[in-house]
Image: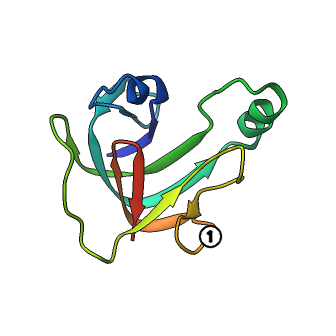
Amino acid sequence: MRVESHLHITRARKGILRCVSFRRLPGGKTEYGSALHLGCVTFAVQPAGLKRFRETGQKNVHAYVRGELQSVTHDRWPTALDPDWREAYYNPTKVSTFVDKEFGHEVHVAGEALLIGTRVYYR
């Protein structure tokens, strides 16, 4: 099943474990988890939402990780990852797309992604 996910910033700031928001495509209801494992992943930033954020400073959901839902965890975060996972980030004040944290190159697609709390990993 294809899903669209993003970090729910308000829940993350409050320390709520289930801060990864996701919904089944097309148009399913929003659900929450502490970690998602996705396959056949695309990283998407909506240009209009990014532009609106940069013009107004008002936060809005405009960046998503989309993919095939492999699993969802509700009660804990995984603690150890294989070394071949890479970390990506998205910060609309600094970049216009998802970026590899170590090397700084843009990330648009991946075979798999893990969304764990406030972090995104891919391979």
Q: Residues within 10 Å of mark 1 (few under 14, many from 20)?
A: few
| Identity of the residue drawn at 43% across and 37% down | 25
| Identity of the residue drawn at 57% across and 65% down | 107
Dividing the picture into quadrants, the one containing residue 56 is top right
Classify mark 1: helix, strand or loop.
loop
| Residue matched to label 1 | 104
Q: Would you say 85 lies left or right of 95 here?
A: left
Q: Is residue 123 above or below residue 113?
A: below
Q: Is residue 46 above or below residue 9?
A: below
Whole-percent x, y for residue 112 in the image: 36, 64
Q: Would you say 87 lies left or right of 92 here?
A: left
For the C terminus, the image quarter is bottom left
Dividing the picture into quadrants, the one containing residue 76 is top left
List the single residue furthest toward the left. 75
Residue placed most toward the observer, 10 or 41 = 10
Whole-percent x, y for residue 41 in the image: 44, 59
Dividing the picture into quadrants, the one containing residue 73 is top left
Whole-percent x, y for residue 101 in the image: 53, 65
Whole-percent x, y for residue 7 in the image: 45, 37
Q: Is residue 91 above or below residue 25?
A: below
Instruction: Please give the count of numbered marks on the rendered protein.
Output: 1
Residue placed most toward the observer, 102 or 49 = 102
Q: Would you say 123 lies left or right of 34 here?
A: right
Q: Is residue 38 above or below residue 47?
A: below
